[in-house]
Amino acid sequence: MLTFTTHPERPGRIVGGLDTGGIVLSVDGGKSWDVRGQGLPEAAVTAITTAVTNPDTIYAAIRGDGLWQSDDAGQSWVFVMDRPWLANAERDLTALSSVDLATGMGGIWLYAGTDTGVTRVPDCFCRWQDVQPGDAMDALASGKQATPKVPLPEGEPVSALVSAVSRPATLYAGLPSGIWQSHDAGVTWLKRSEVIATALAVHPLRADDLVIVNNDGVLQSPDGGRTWTAIANI
């Protein structure tokens, strides 16, 4: 399993994306699994997330293909978006996060990590956009993407990305250089830890309560990444 997603309104449910292609779903916390993903291309699922406003809407990124959406918890899928064109190349998505902030176009944002940084798209899937202040209509009206004041380190791949449900503008990103945090929906970033994370999760009620997975196991931070406690070995 390359990637997985959960939702607080579906306790015990885990949806996983496989490196061999396809989706698996568990409703009992991982004790048993059902195969989903009918209609998806036969390629690795590199990132997956659940829509924060609808626990049965799932987005999956397919290597070499693009972004797919299911509105029935993975039973059926439709293609919704090509891969983003960044730094003169089409980029696979390495992380996904549904972010409950208005786009100005009647929906919310889907943020994505790539091997060159973070991008985003409204959930109407009009086009990928650089992260900037304002909403999608501002970007479309200006026709020009503003440079973030303090972006993530240039050229570093994003292995994990998550928005805090209780404070959606708070984002965490896992990079080779460590864990980074944004309090303004990705316009500016601050490095919070040297710890490497291959997966990130935030408590649904406490935006500073962070859990990560890396080669050392599962670690928890109660203060947004300043301090860490090992809670499991894997």
Image (spheres, rainbow, N blue to C red):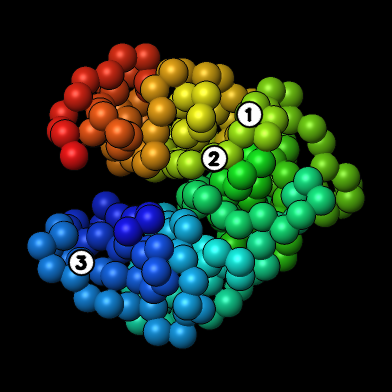
Instruction: From the top left corner, tell me how far across and down residue 155 is, in percent.
Output: 68, 34
Q: In this view, does 130 lie above or below 21?
A: above
Query: Which of marks 3 and 1 precedes in the sequence?
Result: 3
Kind of element beneath mark 3: strand
User: From the image, which quarter does the C terminus lie in?
Assistant: top left
Q: Which of 92 and 202 is in front in this view?
A: 92
Query: Which of marks 1 and 2 precedes in the sequence?
Result: 1
Q: Mark 3 points at which residue?
A: 26
Q: In which quarter of the image is residue 133?
A: top right
Residue beneath the point at 63% across and 29% down: 152
One can see residue 206 in this view: no
- Residue 57 vs residue 142: left or right? left
The amino acid marked with disc number 2 is Val
Q: Name the residue under label 2.
A: 158
Q: Which of 10 and 134 is in front in this view?
A: 10
Residue beneath the point at 32% across and 34% down: 214
Residue at mark 2 to residue at mark 1: CA–CA distance: 9 Å
Mark 2 and mark 1 residues within 8 Å of each other at the beta carbon: yes
Q: How crowded is mark 1: few (under 14 residues within 10 Å), some or many (20 or more)?
A: many
Disc marking residue 176: none
Q: Name the residue under label 1.
A: 152
Query: Which of marks 2 and 3 precedes in the sequence?
Result: 3
- Residue 210 vs residue 30: left or right? right
Q: Is residue 113 above or below residue 21?
A: above
Instruction: From the top left corner, tell me how far across and down residue 104 is, in percent.
Output: 68, 53
Q: Which of 126 and 68 is in front in this view?
A: 68
